Image: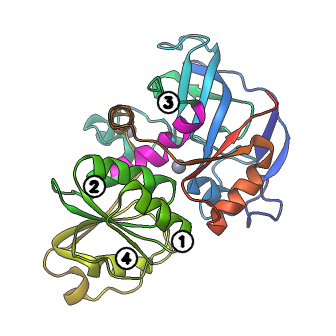
Amino acid sequence: MRAWSVPAPGPVGTGSLRWGRKPVPQPGPGELLVRVRACGVCRTDLHVVEGDLPVRRAGVTPGHEVVGEVTGTGPSAAGFAVGDRVGVAWLRSTDGTCAYCARGAENLCPASRYTGWDADGGYAEYTTVPAAFAHRLPPGIDDVAAAPLLCAGIIGHRALCRAALPPGGRLGLYGFGGSAHLCAQVALARGATVHVLTRGAAARRLALDLGAASARDAYAMPPEPLDSAILFAPVGDLVPVALRALDRGGVLAIAGIHLSDVPPLRYESELFYEREIRSVTSNTREDAREFLALAAGHGVRATTHAYPLARADRALADLAAGRFDGAAVLVDDAS
Ligand SMILES: [Zn+2]
Ligand SMILES: [Zn+2]
């Protein structure tokens, strides 16, 4: 099959992502073989390709927002049949036995493994997924529109929960890419006032089109104090900026898996009055089920830009440069 791989991480555009051939994977015990129809492009893929995240599998195929069709099943794979539409997300497996898994926090499992990092993902014609970690997708959302829901959407949902937004509250979103534009739709559907703070003019326009009350530069102050903020941009310099925008008792959630260093914080103006900072780590399968139901119920839709599978390198370069709003999705038009 045709597939992308990461022979050695480095800046995108320098050969760190290679287009070539790999054997079609064989589904192991409990796994499904999936023919990829669409695969979203997530900022985490960029972190894998560029080496912001350590190598966990040599020559890995990135991609963890996969919509595909089950074309084979390994021994004792239950719950899905050949021909079913299926979603493959970031969380690939956990041990199911540790203290975190036992208390419903499988996102913190020390033995957790991830699609497109520990195992080959969806920048390819085929991939595999443990059936227990595969997702059923709401009907009525096409393959391209559904792909970004599988990481960007789920993480945005978890970040919104971690940000503890009160009913009808004032939410600030720092950065407005794939995850934030889905998160904004859920927050707006629940009656929040949303302020977007981001560098890109196209992203600010999209924010206003979706119903944001304001859209300003990332380093500007929002027009009113915030009850909650979510930092989607991987920029540690924005942490004190977002903290200063919070009202007393406000919460800042940091949504990314990677963040540049946070500068020293000033206690009085940035933390006192019970402002809080919280990180967001991966997601549970329950987060995914909740979000996919919310997305179907509220009509949450990704703004997508389709790229041929063979141009994943271009899609990642455009993501790095902020050249599109919403989310990029790879489509295998040779199939
Ligand atoms: Zn565990
Ligand atoms: Zn992702």
The image quarter in which residue 202 lies: bottom right
Q: Position of residue 44 (x, y in %)?
A: 57, 55
Q: CA distance from mark 1 to mark 2?
A: 28 Å
* Disc 3 secondary structure class: loop
What is the quadrant of residue 231 in the picture?
Answer: bottom left
Residue at 24 percent of width and 47 percent of height: 190
Identified by mark 3, the residue type is Ile
Mark 1 residue type: Ala
Report how far apart the C-alphas of labels 1 and 4 lie in the structure.
21 Å
Which mark identifies residue 239? Answer: 4
Query: Is tag 4's residue or tag 2's residue first in the polypeptide sequence?
Result: 2
Q: Which is more foreground, mark 3 or mark 2? A: 3
* Disc 2 target residue: 162
Of mark 3 and mark 1, the one earlier in the sequence is 3
Mark with earlier residue (4, 3): 3
Question: Do the numbered discs 3 and 1 sit on residues whose CB atoms are within 8 Å?
Answer: no
CA gap, disc 3 and disc 2: 27 Å
Q: Mark 2 or mark 3, which is nearer the start of the sequence? A: 3
**How was the colour assigned to the protein in this rendering?**
rainbow
- Evaluate if marks 3 and 2 touch, with contact meaning CB atoms under 8 Å apart: no
Find the distance from the CA under tag 4 to the CA under tag 2: 16 Å
Residue denoted by label 3: 141
- Mark-to-mark CA distance, 3 and 1: 28 Å
Q: Which residue is mark 1?
A: 201
Instruction: Name the residue furthest right.
Output: 20
Q: Quadrant of the N terminus?
A: top right
Q: Which one is closest to the eye, mark 4 or mark 3?
A: 3
Question: From the viewer's perspective, is 19 left or right of 309?
Answer: right
Q: Which residues are magenta?
A: 143-158
**Percent from the top left, x then y, of residue 19?**
84, 46
